[in-house]
Amino acid sequence: MTNNSPSTEPQPRYVKLAMRNMVQKRATSLKHFFLTTVGLLAVLIGLAYLTR
């Protein structure tokens, strides 16, 4: 037996809302993802160069 009354249904979690937003705004999310990836790689390569 399932109870699908609106009053007992849990609120959508933040992660679920964030993922839905990511799907709707795919281009912006992909751009930010690649910028973050490139930035992180640049920091790691820079640290590796400085500490060699």
Image: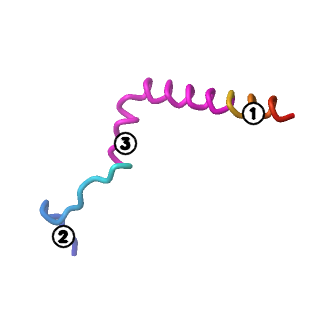
Farthest front residue?
A: 50
* Cα separation between marks 3 and 2: 26 Å
**Nearer the camera: disc 3 or disc 1:** 1
| Numbered badge on residue 18 | 3
Does residue 37 appear left or right of residue 28 in this picture? right
Q: Looking at the picture, how far across and down is residue 22, in whole percent?
A: 40, 35
Does residue 45 appear left or right of residue 27 in this picture? right
Q: Looking at the picture, how far across and down is residue 34, in whole percent?
A: 57, 27
| Numbered badge on residue 47 | 1
| Numbered badge on residue 3 | 2
Does residue 21 appear left or right of residue 4 in this picture? right
* Cα separation between marks 1 and 2: 55 Å
| Span highlighted in magenta in the image | 16-41
Q: In this orientation, which residue lies closer to the viewer: 33 or 46?
A: 46
What count of labels does the image hold?
3
**Nearer the camera: disc 1 or disc 2:** 1
What SS does tag 3 mark?
A: helix
Query: In which quadrant will I find the C terminus?
Result: top right
Could you classify mark 3 by the number of other residues whose Cα lies within 10 Å: few (under 14), some (14-19), or many (20 or more)?
few
What SS does tag 2 mark?
A: loop
Could you classify mark 1 by the number of other residues whose Cα lies within 10 Å: few (under 14), some (14-19), or many (20 or more)?
few
Q: Quadrant of residue 6?
A: bottom left
Amino acid type assigned to the residue bearing label 2 in the image: Asn
- The residue located at (61%, 31%) in the rendering is 37
Q: Are marks 3 and 2 in contact (CB under 8 Å)?
A: no
Amino acid type assigned to the residue bearing label 3 in the image: Ala
Question: Compared to 22, does 12 lie above or below?
Answer: below
In reply to whether residue 35 is colored magenta, the answer given is yes
- The residue located at (22%, 75%) in the rendering is 1
Badge 3 or badge 2: first in the primary sequence? 2
